[in-house]
Amino acid sequence: MNITVLELSEDKVKISIVGQGHTFMNALISEIQKDPAVDVANYIIEFQFSDPVLTVTTHDKKDPLAPYLAV
């Protein structure tokens, strides 16, 4: 699985995940949202054949990559 970090700040990360669809992304979002540090976790697939972009924001400027890496 190819992953590209598009944006990274103290409390927000945007990640492109190559070749995945709604099924995988919905499962991933469900797991990430279980982390109490996560404020918002969502994804967007702009076009039918584009790769999804995952966005995670956290409370209190906690590491936004930690919930993703824990899955």
Image (cartoon, rainbow, N blue to C red):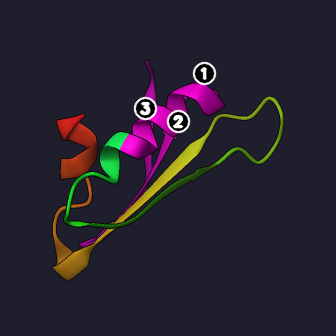
Amino acid type of the residue tagged 2 in the rendering:
Met
Q: Identify residue for label 1.
A: 19
Residue range of the region highlighted in magenta in the rendering: 1-30
What amino acid is at disc 3? Ile
* Residue 58 visible (yes or no): yes
Local crowd at mark 3 within 10 Å, few (<14), some, or many (≥20)? few
Secondary structure state at the residue bearing disc 2: helix
The secondary structure type at the circle numbered 1 is loop
Circle 1 Cα neighbour tier, 10 Å, few/some/many (<14 / 14–19 / ≥20): few
Q: Is residue 46 left or right of residue 12?
A: right
Closest to the camera, between mark 3 and mark 2, is: 2
Where's the C terminus, which quadrant? Answer: top left
Residue 19 image offset from top left, x and y in percent:
60, 21
Q: Gap in Å between the C-alphas at discs 3 and 1?
A: 10 Å
Mark before the other along the chain sequence, 3 or 1: 3
In the depicted structure, whether residue 30 falls above or below residue 19 = below
